[in-house]
Image (cartoon, rainbow, N blue to C red):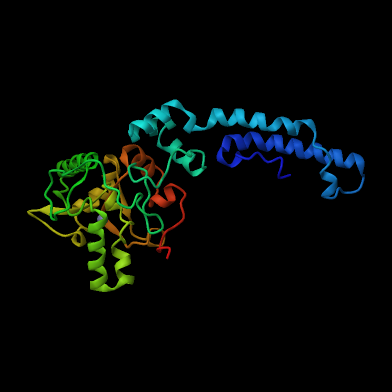
């Protein structure tokens, strides 16, 4: 029956739904055809007589259905992608949940979860930043207290972070500051190298990304700290009012806590309540509503606990 299977069925779930009943019909007709020739149970050879006419019509039907359901053929999606406006892309898909569903189904070939310039990029131990020397087009500070020399992030991310910090302060959760934001590939070489020298490779891999595997290189990740009076470090963030507030409200500002407690088997990292990853308000809302805890689960990707050597 392999010649009857439409070539692109797997790329379009709705096409598949249409294809299955037609396929069953073809199977039934073929079986009846074979049974009419032989009252005994049909052998494989007997199910291969010249195909009924309906089989030859199938490809045309398939093409028509696919053209109507492939979101990447939608002019609104194409225009939004060309403009670089991720919110407009998600809207053109019919929202972030429709976007997620299409991507998981393999029905959106124009969307790459590897493209570092989009809020839906997934970087982990199995997926590198692409291209290797990627740097965001625009970087800026958030205006918050900053404890390192690398406190910038993508301009839209820094703006969202400033809004988040302001809301946290208004809610009585205290001041939030920035530790690390954007880190270039070269800076990640030095950061990871320091961890390896201090604690060895195995231990370093649980707390620091290897170069090319850090979300910080995308400009979408920010490590935040508590700054009541003075700023403390990232390892003092857990247990602070800021940390509790961020865990509950970061999604409202387009961020997720990327490395949660108990998810090391999926992410490869111990809990980092300070590491916020910007995914934009649309995806963050769906992520929160769906009760997701890792981006890997959210996009139906394999767990990435270890580097692929
Ligand atoms: Zn981080």
User: Which of the two residues, 173 or 14, is positioned nearer the viewer here?
Assistant: 14
Q: Quadrant of the C terminus?
A: bottom left
Determine the residue positioned at 44% across, 41% down: 100
Q: Residue at x 24, y 39 (%)?
A: 156
Query: The N terminus lies in which quarter of the figure?
Result: top right
In the image, is 150 to the left or to the right of 283?
A: left
Q: Whole-percent x and y of residue 215?
A: 30, 52
Residue lying furthest top in this view?
75
Q: Residue furthest left?
A: 229
Quadrant of the rendered image holding ligand 1? bottom left
Q: Position of residue 205 (x, y in %)?
A: 32, 66
Q: Is residue 94 visible?
A: no
Q: Is residue 159 left or right of residue 134?
A: left
* Observer-nearest of 205 and 284: 205
On screen, residue 171 versus residue 33, left or right, reads left
Residue 95 at x, y percent in the picture: 41, 33
Q: Position of residue 223 (x, y in %)?
A: 22, 53
Residue 267 showing in the rendered view: yes
The reply, left or right, for residue 142 in relation to residue 218 is left
Residue at left 80%, top 34%? Answer: 52
- Rendering quarter of residue 306: bottom left
Q: Is residue 5 above or below residue 241?
A: above
User: How many numbered discs?
Assistant: 0
Determine the residue positioned at 92% across, 45% down: 39
């Amino acid at each position: 029956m392999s010649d009857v299977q439409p070539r692109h069925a797997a790329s379009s779930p709705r096409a598949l739904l249409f294809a299955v009943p037609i396929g069953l019909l073809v199977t039934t007709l073929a079986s009846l055809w074979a049974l009419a020739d032989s009252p005994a149970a049909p052998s494989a050879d007997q199910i291969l007589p010249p195909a009924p006419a309906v089989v030859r019509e199938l490809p045309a039907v398939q093409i028509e259905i696919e053209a109507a359901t492939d979101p990447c053929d939608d002019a609104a999606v194409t225009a939004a992608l060309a403009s670089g406006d991720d919110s407009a892309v998600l809207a053109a898909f019919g929202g972030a949940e429709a976007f997620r569903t299409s991507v998981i189904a393999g029905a959106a070939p124009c969307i790459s979860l590897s493209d570092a310039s989009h809020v839906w990029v997934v970087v982990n131990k199995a997926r590198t930043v692409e291209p290797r020397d990627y740097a965001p087009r625009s970087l800026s500070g958030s205006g918050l207290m900053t404890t390192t020399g690398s406190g910038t992030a993508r301009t839209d991310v820094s703006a969202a972070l400033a809004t988040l910090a302001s809301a946290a302060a208004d809610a009585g959760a205290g001041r939030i500051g920035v530790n690390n934001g954007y880190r270039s590939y070269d800076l990640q070489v030095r950061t990871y190298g320091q961890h390896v020298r201090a604690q060895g490779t195995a231990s370093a891999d649980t707390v620091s990304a290897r170069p090319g595997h850090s979300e910080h290189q995308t400009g979408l990740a920010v490590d935040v700290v508590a700054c009541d009076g003075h700023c403390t470090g990232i390892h003092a963030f857990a247990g602070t009012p800021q940390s509790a507030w961020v865990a509950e409200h970061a999604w409202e500002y387009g961020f997720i806590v990327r490395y949660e407690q108990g998810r090391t088997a999926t992410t490869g990292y111990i809990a980092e309540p300070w590491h916020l990853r910007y995914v934009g308000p649309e995806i963050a809302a769906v992520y929160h509503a769906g009760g997701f805890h890792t981006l890997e689960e959210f996009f139906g990707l394999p767990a990435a606990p270890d580097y692929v050597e």
